[in-house]
Each structure stands twice: as C-alpha cells, then as structure tokens.
Image (cartoon, rainbow, N blue to C red):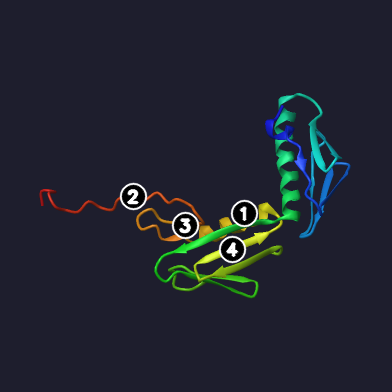
Amino acid sequence: MSRIGKKPIQIPKGTTVTVKGNVVEAKGQHGTLSVECNDLVTLEVADDKVLLTNKSGLKEHRKFHGLYRSLVNNIVIGVSDGFTKQLELVGVGYRSSVAGKDLVLEVGYSNPVKLRIPDGIKASVDKNTKITLWGIDKQIVGQFAANVREIRPPEPYKGKGIRYKDEQVRRKAGKAGAIGQGA
C-alpha cells in the first residue's frame, strides 16, 4: 500500500470538493480545477477530508494510489492558496520586465527574449532581477518556470544565469594558469 496514498487530504475552509465518477473537482476562492482519476482508485469525501483507497493490492494498481492522491492534493491546495515559483537573474546587465502578456528577459543575448505568459499565471518582476510566478495549477506554474530558466541556465564558472530562488549552483574552478607548465 502506498504511504503517500494512505494520508487523507484535508479540505481547507472555503473549498469544496466533489466526486463525480472518476472526476474530482475542487472549487475555491481562486478558481476551479479538476482531475480525472483511474478506475483503480476509489475516492470518498467525508468530514472535510478526501480519502483514496486502492481497489486491489496488485503492484500495477498500487503505483497509481500515491500518484492520484498527490494530484488531488495539488488541485485542493491550488484553488485555496495557489502555487508560487520565484526566479532570480544573476549577471551584469541581466534584467527582466513584464510587458502586457509577455515576460521580457535581457540576459546577454543580442536581442531581448520574449516569452508569452500562459493563461492562469500571474507574473511580476521586482527590482528587475526577481521574477515571481503565481497560479493555481502546479504543473503549469512549474513548467513555465522551467521554460524561463531554460533561456539562460546558471553556468558553473561565474554563476551567471537564471536560477530558482535559493538554488545552490555548484561552482567550478577556472583554468589553473600556465605557470610551471614547462613553457
């Protein structure tokens, strides 16, 4: 039995969760999300908790138990609180801004890089170097943050690039120099 799947999901106040067949729908102050579950998992809503149970003990079925518990938990948290990802730009002359529905990044290329902000995500920039992404769908927020980071990932020699807040970049030593090389 899945250890994650056994944990009940607490439903916060102001959030309602309904189960119709295999579809779980959560409504909260920030919006509505739904996830379709497999037939291998049974869902119940009771006493402000969502319980997931595995229909059988087969190994193929157990792996879905924890997966769907995490997906349902993510939609409940998303509609009540939302998800935030924070990115930092490190480098001389690196800056960012929000222009309408575009995130504009100036990260050392000859032209600024413009990324379209997906629907359901709010982006804000603080001090030209700190980007905050917020949304109710954890997968969309995380994927967009990964797409932004992919524009200029942190490099290991000087640490320049776009990184997640509090991300540790492993630094490498540069070249050792030509002294004592028998030149």
Q: CA distance from mark 4 to mark 2?
A: 28 Å
Q: Residue at x 55, y 65 (%)?
A: 131
Question: As drawn, which residue projects farthest toward the bottom?
Answer: 99
Crowding near pointer 3: few (<14 within 10 Å), some, many (20+)? Answer: some
Q: Position of residue 60 (x, y in %)?
A: 72, 28
Residue highlighted by disc 4: 132
Q: Does residue 146 show up?
A: yes
Q: Does residue 114 show up?
A: no
Dot 4 or dot 3, earlier in sequence: 4
Residue highlighted by disc 2: 172
Foreground pick, 19 / 103: 19
Q: CA distance from mark 4 to mark 3?
A: 17 Å
Residue highlighted by disc 3: 153
Crowding near pointer 1: few (<14 within 10 Å), some, many (20+)? Answer: some
Secondary element type, mark 4: strand
Position of the N terminus by quadrant: top right
Tell me, yes or no, whether the two marked residues, 4 and 2, touch with CB atoms within 8 Å.
Answer: no
Mark 2: amino acid: Lys
Mark 3: amino acid: Pro
